[in-house]
Image (cartoon, grey):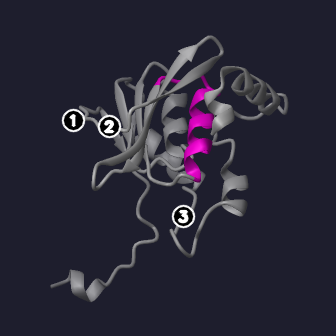
């Protein structure tokens, strides 16, 4: 995270990542995060299957506007939406401090314009807010006050990874 907030270190990091010629239409860290950082037992973290990212993008379309991802993770669904909506305005909410640097990197390396709220989308408590602003090839990342947006965000598209890990009791839901 500290390297992402330092303009010189960020540019060096991004240039090293891009030297491998990655596909910027997909999450750069999917396999790495899934294998090394997801807390499948404690937090029930898992990755959005690529097919689901493609499906949500196809259903949402590419008309521009404001896109909100309320459980952004490392940004898989947001990236797929951006690929077809590069002029859009993106808002990403993420609770996990482990996933947050991956999300910021994934958005800024593409030169996206976004606001990332590190906090709880349900309680509306924020730990930090990051503004990601296009600045040449990459985006600048500026950390702001941990203030949740006062008003709701008027969105054209709302994305959310289905809660794959939520336990469901069919009998209780049928009552």
Q: Which residue is mark 1?
A: 150
Residue 46 image-quadrant placement: bottom right
Quarter occupied by the C terminus: bottom left
Residues at marks 3 and 1, CA–CA distance in whole angstroms: 28 Å
Check disc 3: other Cα within 10 Å, few if <14, some if 14-19, many if 20+.
some
Asked if the magenta segment contains residue 111, the reply would be yes
Q: At 42% from the left edge and 23% from the top edge, which residue is drawn?
A: 88
Q: Is residue 24 visible?
A: no
Sequence-wise, the earlier of marks 3 and 1 is 3
Q: Which residues are magenta?
A: 98-113
Q: Are marks 3 and 2 in contact (CB under 8 Å)?
A: no
Q: Is residue 151 above or below residue 132?
A: below
Residues at marks 3 and 2, CA–CA distance in whole angstroms: 25 Å
* Label 1: which secondary element: loop
Q: Main secondary structure of the magenta part?
A: helix
Q: Is residue 135 above or below residue 12?
A: above
Asked if the magenta segment contains residue 105, the reply would be yes
Tell me residue 137's x, y (percent): 66, 15
Tell me residue 33's x, y (percent): 67, 55
Residue 40 image-quadrant placement: bottom right
Say which of marks 3 and 2 sits in front: 2
Tell me residue 4's x, y (percent): 64, 32
* Label 2: which secondary element: loop
- Disc assigned to residue 45: 3
- Disc assigned to residue 147: 2
Check disc 2: other Cα within 10 Å, few if <14, some if 14-19, many if 20+.
some
Q: Are marks 2 and 1 in contact (CB under 8 Å)?
A: yes
């Amino acid at each position: 995270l500290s390297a992402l907030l330092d303009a010189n270190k960020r540019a060096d990091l991004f240039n090293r990542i891009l030297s491998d010629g990655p596909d910027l239409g997909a999450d750069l860290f999917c396999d790495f995060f899934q294998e090394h950082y997801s807390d499948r037992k404690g937090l029930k973290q898992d990755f959005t299957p690529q097919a689901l990212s493609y499906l949500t993008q196809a259903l949402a379309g590419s008309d521009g506007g404001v896109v909100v991802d309320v459980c952004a993770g490392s940004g898989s669904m947001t990236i797929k939406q951006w690929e077809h909506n590069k002029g859009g305005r993106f808002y990403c909410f993420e609770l996990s401090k482990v996933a947050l640097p991956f999300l910021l990197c994934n958005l800024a390396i593409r030169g996206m314009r976004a606001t990332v709220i590190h906090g709880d989308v349900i309680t509306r408590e924020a730990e930090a807010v990051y503004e990601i602003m296009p600045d040449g090839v990459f985006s600048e990342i500026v950390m702001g006050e941990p203030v949740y947006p006062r008003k709701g965000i008027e969105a054209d598209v709302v994305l959310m990874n289905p809660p794959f890990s939520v336990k469901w009791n069919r009998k209780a839901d049928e009552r």
